[in-house]
Structures are given as structure tokens and as C-alpha cells.
Image (spheres, rainbow, N blue to C red):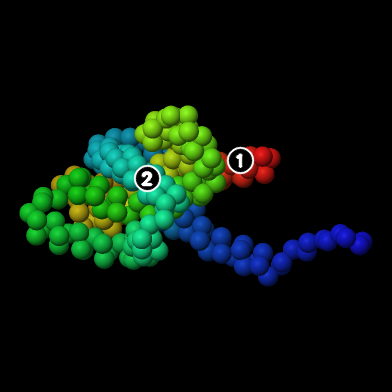
Amino acid sequence: MSGSYIERPNRPLLIYAVLFLIVLYLPVMLLPLFSFNDSIYVKFPLKGFTFQWYIELMDRDPAWAALRNSLKVGITTALISTGLGIFAAKAITRYTLPGRGPVVGFIMLPLVIPGIIFGVALLVLLSQLGIRLSLYTVTIGHIIICLPFAIATMIPRFEGFDKSVEEASADLGENAWWTFWRITFPMVFPGILASLLLTFTVSFDEFIMAFFLSGTDATLPMYIWGQLRFPQAFPSILALASIILLVSFILVFLGQWINRSATSDSLESETNT
């Protein structure tokens, strides 16, 4: 047994993790369960199994209009926040910036400050500037929220990036712009894709900013919130929420998997060299 070590499972930690997952996900898992219930009332016992609410959802034009609005806002937010996150992460990891710590902390503030504070602050600011509330103002609010997620996703990718490759490109006469597009961009692309997926999901599901900053064009979370007052519409909302939940989980896990795979591949290549 000398030189060998058998790792024993930490039972208290395992029990805590299981209880944590149950408390966190069990209420969420009830949504798809009741979306197949043959009753408008959310209660046990279930009356039966049906696809009726999903069929009714197909005929709700306002729901699909709200979905299109959320897709527009989400895609725009993902592209802008990821684009800004690329250059911010590059600057943070590549250059010595004066006051780097406070600047990075200021950028990351939306991760710790409640969204309602940003929502009220932006609403007051836009009102003072005379800007009409619309999907554009919702997009601005979502970019503020999603930018820290984009930066946090991109920083590990740039930290695992071999700087000598960029230096070699510069030594061969390539300017900074073409070095970025031909060398840096392809190597950090997995992180970019992960950031796009993550920021789109955050924007698509966001409610507080949309509540304060949306005008007459409602996003999907706003539409769902408005329909909760009507009991007859509630089962269809459960069906819609179940679809959103499934897509959100897929996008988030896909984004994290891509980012982890890219980071592990980078570390493995550095180890081999």
C-alpha cells in the first residue's frame, strides 16, 4: 500500500450536494410535469396525460410575437456583449492597465448588484433624456447585464492562449488587425461561441430589465407574466415555459461544455509542448 492513496467519498458533502440539487431543481421540474396535465389547475393528483396545451400554444399569435421580440433582443445582445467582451478580456489579460483592479470590478458590478437597481436607474436616465421605451432600450439594459458574463467566459480562453503565436505573426510582418483575425480569433473561437450561447440565454430569460424598459412590444418573459392573471391561459403558459426551460438548459450546458473543452485542450497542448 506504500505510495498509493485511496480517495474516500465525502459523504456529508455528497448528501449536501444531492439535497441542494433537489431543492434547486425539483420546483423547476414541476413545470413540464403540469404542462402535460389534463386540467387547468396546478395540483395533485394529476388528472391525465395530454398534449392539448401544447396544441393550443401553437395558435397564440401574441406568444409567437413576443418570442420573436425576445429572439431579436437576445441575438443583438449576444453579438454586442460578446464583441465587447472579446476586446475587454484581451485587454485585461494582455496589457498592464492603470487601475486594472477597480476597472474590472466596476465592469463586473452587474453580477452582484440586483437587476432592479439597474432597471430603475436606466428608466430614470432614459426618461430624463426623453428616449422612448422600446426593444432598443431593453437591449441596452440586457447588454449591461450580459457584458460581465461575456468577459468572465472569455478571460480563461485568453489566459490559456499562447502569446508567442501572436508575436510570431507580428515578427512575420502581419499587422495587429490581421493578426487578430487570422491568429487570435480562430484560437479563441470556442470561447466566443460559449459566450454567445450564454449571453443569449441570459438575455432571453431576463425579466426585470424588460419590465422597466420595454414599451408596447413585450418580450416573452413579459408576455408570460401578463398571462398569469388568466387561469384558462395558464396551462399553455406552462407548456411555453417548459419549452423555454429545455432550450435554456441545452444552450447553457452546451456553452459551458464548449468553453471547458476548449480550455482543457489548450492546457493539454501547452503541457505537450
Looking at the image, residue 37 lies above or below residue 125? above
Between disc 1 and disc 2, the foreground one is 2
Mark 1, Cα crowd under 10 Å, few <14 / some 14-19 / many 20+, is: few
Looking at the image, residue 167 lies above or below residue 153? above
Quarter of the image with the N terminus in it: bottom right
> Which kind of residue does numbered mark 1 sit on?
Asp
Identify the element where label 2 is drawn: helix
- Is residue 251 in view from this perspective? no
Percent x, y for residue 262? 56, 41
Q: Can you identify the residue that label 2 sits on? A: 87
| Position of residue 190 in the picture relative to residue 218 (left or right) | right
* Residue extending farthest left: 130
Residue sitting at 24 percent across and 38 percent down?
65
Quarter of the image with the C terminus in it: top right
Whether pointer 1 and pointer 2 mark residues with C-beta atoms closer than 8 Å, the reply is no
The residue lying toward the viewer, choosing from 103 and 151, is 103
- Is residue 119 in view from this perspective? yes
Looking at the image, is mark 1 or mark 2 earlier in the sequence?
A: 2
Identify the element where label 1 is drawn: helix
| Position of residue 171 in the picture relative to residue 62 (left or right) | right
Total residue callouts: 2
Mark 2, Cα crowd under 10 Å, few <14 / some 14-19 / many 20+, is: few
Q: Can you identify the residue that label 1 sits on? A: 265
Percent x, y for residue 136? 20, 45
Q: CA distance from mark 1 to mark 2?
A: 22 Å
Percent x, y for residue 252? 47, 46
> Which kind of residue does numbered mark 2 sit on?
Phe
